[in-house]
Image (spheres, helix red, strand yellow):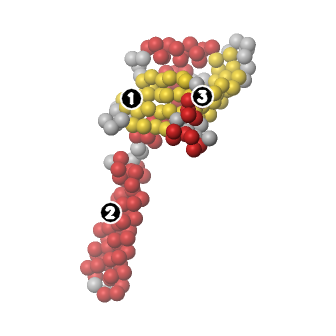
């Protein structure tokens, strides 16, 4: 299914070319069987496009989950943030809960070097990206402090959702030192 989602334009294009060839043959020969035969590739092309558009790749699902978590952080919705984490990761849940109790994050920007890789099993994924965040201490001691980060976030698939299994917050320079990010500075 992933191959189809990644290549639906090519498959639909090939079906369209086959149908166009049959229609052109019908125009030249008036053989009704060619016109009838053209309906099969046209139906296949429409079917491929419908299935491809309705199927969301695992990378797109992880990206959606990542941005939903970032939005929940911005909107100060601790329950939603904790809901995006694996329930068994008590230490991580506690750390994040404590951090969000101390700080209010008002702006999270995930940078364009976001890379999502999904394991061959399709059960695990890793998102690596730089991000900036604007935060203030809830006690008023620090206001609108902008921080830069490089995150490595590990996800695990739980039925139809991707949950954060673990994460690392590294030096922001690490994100721009990766070979794939060198061209995007």
Residue 10 point in image, percent of width and height? 39, 60
First of labels 1, 3 by sequence position: 1
Q: Earlier in the sequence, mark 2 or mark 1?
A: 2
Q: Secondary structure at mark 1?
A: strand
In this picture, residue 183 sits left or right of residue 26: right
Estimate how packed mark 2 is, as few (under 14), some (14 to 19) or many (20 or more) residues with alpha carbons within 10 Å.
Answer: some
The percent position of residue 66, horizontal first and vertical second, equals: 50, 33
Distance from the alpha carbon under mark 3 to that under mark 2? 47 Å
Q: Quadrant of residue 163?
A: top left
Q: Earlier in the sequence, mark 3 or mark 2?
A: 2
Tell me if 128 is positioned left or right of 131 in this view. Answer: left
Quickly name the residue at label 2. 44
**Where is residue 78 drawn, in percent x and y?**
55, 21
Mark 3, Cα crowd under 10 Å, few <14 / some 14-19 / many 20+, is some
Residue 85 in the image: above or below residue 54: above
**Pointers 2 and 1 in contact (CB under 8 A)?**
no
> Of circles 3 and 2, which is in front?
3
- Mark 3, residue position: 172
Residue 156 badge:
1
Q: Is residue 27 above or below residue 168?
A: below
Circle 2 SS class = helix
């Amino acid at each position: 299914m992933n191959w189809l989602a990644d290549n639906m334009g090519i498959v639909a294009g090939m079906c369209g070319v086959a149908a166009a060839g049959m229609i052109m043959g019908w125009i030249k020969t008036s053989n009704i069987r060619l016109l009838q035969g053209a309906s099969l590739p046209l139906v296949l092309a429409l079917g491929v496009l419908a299935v491809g558009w309705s199927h969301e790749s695992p990378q797109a699902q992880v990206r959606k989950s990542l941005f939903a978590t970032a939005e929940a952080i911005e909107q100060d919705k601790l329950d939603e943030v904790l809901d995006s984490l694996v329930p068994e990761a008590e230490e991580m849940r506690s750390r994040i809960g404590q951090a969000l109790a101390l700080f209010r994050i008002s702006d999270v920007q995930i940078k364009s070097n976001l890379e999502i890789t999904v394991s061959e099993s399709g059960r695990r994924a890793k998102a690596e990206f730089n991000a900036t965040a604007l935060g203030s201490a809830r006690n008023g001691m620090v206001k609108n402090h902008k921080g830069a980060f490089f995150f490595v976030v590990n996800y695990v698939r739980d039925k139809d959702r991707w949950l954060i299994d673990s994460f690392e917050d590294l030096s922001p320079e690490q994100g721009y030192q990766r070979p794939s990010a060198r061209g995007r500075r």
